[in-house]
Amino acid sequence: MNKKSENSIIISTYKDRDLYFAVGYSEIGKIIRIALPQKNEENAVSEISKYYPEFLVSDQYSNTAKLLSDIYHGKNVEVKLELLDFSKSTINTSFEMDVIREVVKIPYGNIITYKEIAKSLNSQAYRAVGTAIGKNPFPILIPCHRVIRSDGKIGDFQGGTPMKMEILKNEGIKIHNFKIMNSI
C-alpha cells in the first residue's frame, strides 16, 4: 500500500547480499521503526507497516537502511537516541525506556547480561528486562543482540537465534554451541 496522508510514514529499503533492510521515518523526520533483515523487500516493508498501516515506500532514507546493513555486517556505529522517535513505539513505560537507554550504552563487540542490566537499574526484574528488550522498535541500531543470559548462552532474539549469532559473530564475539566464548 502506497497511500499518503498526514499521518503517513516513509519506509525506505536497501538490499545487501540476499537480505533487505528497511527503516521507517515519521513525518517529523525521525526514525520510527526498523525491520530486522528479510529475504524479500515485501516482508521487510511489512515488518514496519504492520505497526504503521499508512505509509509511502521511497528511497528518501535508503542511506539509513544501508547503515543498518553495515551495522549488521559488523560496522561499529554510534547511536544517538535523539534521532529515534519513541512517541508511537511499543516502548511505553519508564522502566522499558530505562532498559533501552542501558542497551544503547553496550559497546561494540561487547556483551552484557539481562541480570547486569537489571542491577544497573537497581532492580531484580531480569525477565522484565528481557520483555523490554523484546519490544525494541529499533533492532540492530539499538544493540539488543548484545544482551545475553547469565549462563553465557545467547538467549532469544526477535529475528531468531541464528540471526543473533550472526550479528554477534560479525562484531567479533566468539560463540560455540550457542554459548559466548568471550569472558562475560
Image (spheres, grey):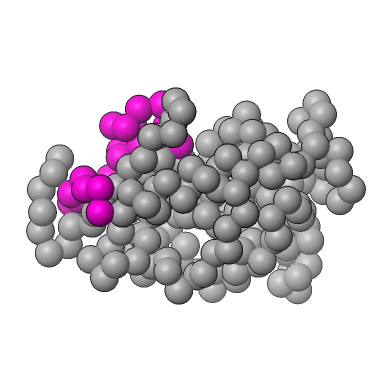
Q: Is residue 159 visible?
A: yes
Q: Residue at x 30, y 38 (%)?
A: 46
Report the label total: 0
Q: Is 126 positioned to the left or the right of 167 in the image?
A: right
Pinpoint residue 58: horizontal percent, then vertical percent: 21, 48
What residue range appears in magenta?
Answer: 37-60
Q: Residue at x 47, y 48 (%)?
A: 68
Pinpoint residue 95: horizontal percent, then vertical percent: 59, 70
Q: Quadrant of the N terminus?
A: top left
Q: Residue at x 36, y 40 (%)?
A: 14
Q: Is 164 positioned to the left or the right of 115 in the image?
A: left
Q: Is 8 positioned to the left or the right of 99 in the image?
A: left
Q: Is 155 positioned to the left or the right of 88 in the image?
A: right
Pinpoint residue 80: horizontal percent, then vertical percent: 51, 69
Q: Is residue 53 visible?
A: no
In magenta segment, residue 46 = yes
Relative to 168, residue 122 above or below: below
Q: Nearer the viewer, residue 68 or 47?
A: 68
In magenta segment, residue 42 = yes
Q: Nearer the viewer, residue 142 or 157?
A: 142
Relative to 126, residue 98 above or below: below
Relative to 136, residue 124 above or below: below
The quarter of the picture where residue 177 lies is top right
Pinpoint residue 84: horizontal percent, then vertical percent: 42, 66
Relative to 27, residue 135 above or below: above
